[in-house]
Amino acid sequence: MAYKVLLFGLINSAQKYLTGEVFNYKVNATGSSLKKSQIWTIEFTREDSPMVHIKSSFNRYIAADKDGKITCDQEAPTPNCVFLMTLHPDGRVSFQSERSKRYLGGNQDNITCFAQAISDSEKWVPHLVIHPSVNMFNPGRKNYLRLNEQSGRLYCDKKQPWGADCVMTLYFDIKEKKYAIRTGTGSFIACNGKTEPEVTHRTLYRLEIKNGMICLKDMHGKFLSVKDSNVKTVKTLNPSTDELFIIDPSPGQISIMSLANEKYISCKPGPAVYSNINDIKDAGNFQIMMDSTTKRVCFQNISKQYLAVGVKGFIEVSKFLDFHCWFQIIYNWEKAALKASDGRYVTVNAGGQLLVGPIAIGRQEEFVFKLTNRSQLILQCEFGFIGIIPGKQRLVCNRPMYEASKITSTADGFYQFKIASLDKYWEVDEEDFITATGEVPVNFTIELITSDQMILRGPNGKYVVAESDGSFKAVGENAKSASSFRY
């Protein structure tokens, strides 16, 4: 059993990704971009140990025999699958077979574990595999990073990654092989702890791996640190827990507004749940989680409690996730209804209290879900990221790097997306392709499936579909035909 795992692409000195093929489980270094075959899981075998296993996206482990031959067909790790991971000052890593003491390296189809010494061919740049919208946790302070918009600085003082101020966006500079960290306002974290509007040498960091966690080193060799809860770089030869981070996917969070009284649902002290607030705060934010078998969802609040149907039919908060916590979301364009497990719908009474009762949907049973912790939308499908072909204004779905879209929304639940680099809005052309050509906001709708998956509907009433050739079109007739996007 692995102590910790990290997912990476591994780039060699020829700027190619290590690739695991499903055909005969071969290993080469021919990948020009990071896709499924280029994703590797680095499994740390125990705490404070550099010993690792390297697993392909097809759940097979790399093994090296005494002659340096590489295979990747082991369903479970054997002694030949154990490697010592060495970190170099420039952030690159090498892998030494624990049995043969030889190093993993090579180019193109000639990947071996035969080199007795480390050259450039045995050094790999780790490219972190995670959706760019993340939360950054420091295990020393046991807190998450958050942005203080007023001061333009980052602090490490939030116990729960709740709200837009805790969402960071990773930007990987493919040329420099370095990372920048963008806040929800679109600014980047500089080495002095302040934020800057553009990516510069002051906002780029080399990623280093230590004990299954990461460190970020600036151009001066200093490490990003959270000493005294303030985020800035410090000089140290041996990074401590103040310089270590766990990077987790950032779950989407929503508010729920009743269209009956135009108030938001809030979990205040006490079991009862009301739709009675005007401003969205932490108590009015929820995460959606889905049961993969039943496709029903539950709603978790900041206190890790769940919305649930109580004994008298009123909606309450529950510490336990059981049968009464699961609902089915029924979408109707920008509106949604919640059906409880017994087939009745959640409604709002005259006092704003939530309960179940009706078996049909009326105005009292209609809600709007609003995505509250994303100011930038970064979409990823099975073929790659949503982006723009250089020199064109048509969006495609198979780009190796993302193009972020600024999100705005209306009070009644519609969304508009603007490509910042072009200063143009998304719209649908005559052939149903989605383009970045709009001069004015165009209404799309979002249907949230889970805390990291959504589907989209265009202004033409069709659902958005992604194809392997990169086509990104609003052509789906129903939700089943829509493509699911990680956000």
Image (cartoon, rainbow, N blue to C red):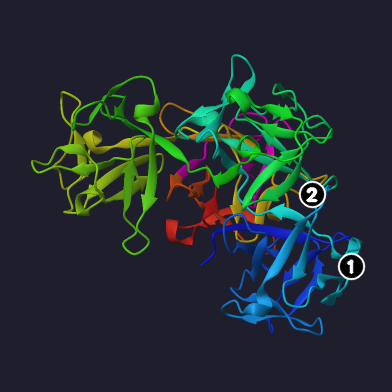
**Stretch in magenta:** 418-446
- The amino acid type, in three-letter code, at marker 1 is Ala
* Contact? badges 2 and 1 (CB < 8 Å): no
- Mark 2 / mark 1, whichever is N-terminal: 2
Q: Is residue 421 visible?
A: no
Rendering coords of residue 136 (x, y %)? 57, 39
Q: Residue at x 88, y 64 (%)?
A: 118
Mark 2 Cα shell of 10 Å, populated few (<14), some (14-19), many (≥20): many
Looking at the rendered image, the disc whose residue lies closer to the viewer, 2 or 1, is 1
**Residue lying farthest to the top in this orientation:** 150
User: For the residues marked 2 and 1, what is the alpha-carbon distance in whole angstroms?
Assistant: 18 Å
Rendering coords of residue 485 (x, y %)? 54, 52
Is residue 108 found left or right of 332 in the rendered image? right
Determine which quarter of the picture holds residue 197.
top right
Residue labelled with disc 2: 91
Residue labelled with disc 1: 117
Q: Residue at x 65, y 37 (%)?
A: 243
Q: Which of the numbered marks, if any, corresponds to residue 269?
A: none
Is residue 260 found left or right of 68 in the rendered image? left
Is residue 462 found left or right of 281 in the rendered image? right
User: Regarding mark 1 in the picture, which secondary structure is present there?
Assistant: loop
Q: Residue at x 87, y 71 (%)?
A: 106
Above-or-below relation of 381 to 132: below
Above-or-below relation of 172 to 22: above
Rendering coords of residue 202 (x, y %)? 81, 29
Q: Nearer the viewer, residue 283 or 208?
A: 208
Q: Is residue 69 visible?
A: yes
Determine which quarter of the picture holds residue 238.
top right
- The amino acid type, in three-letter code, at marker 2 is Gly
Q: Is residue 68 magenta?
A: no
Mark 1 Cα shell of 10 Å, populated few (<14), some (14-19), many (≥20): few
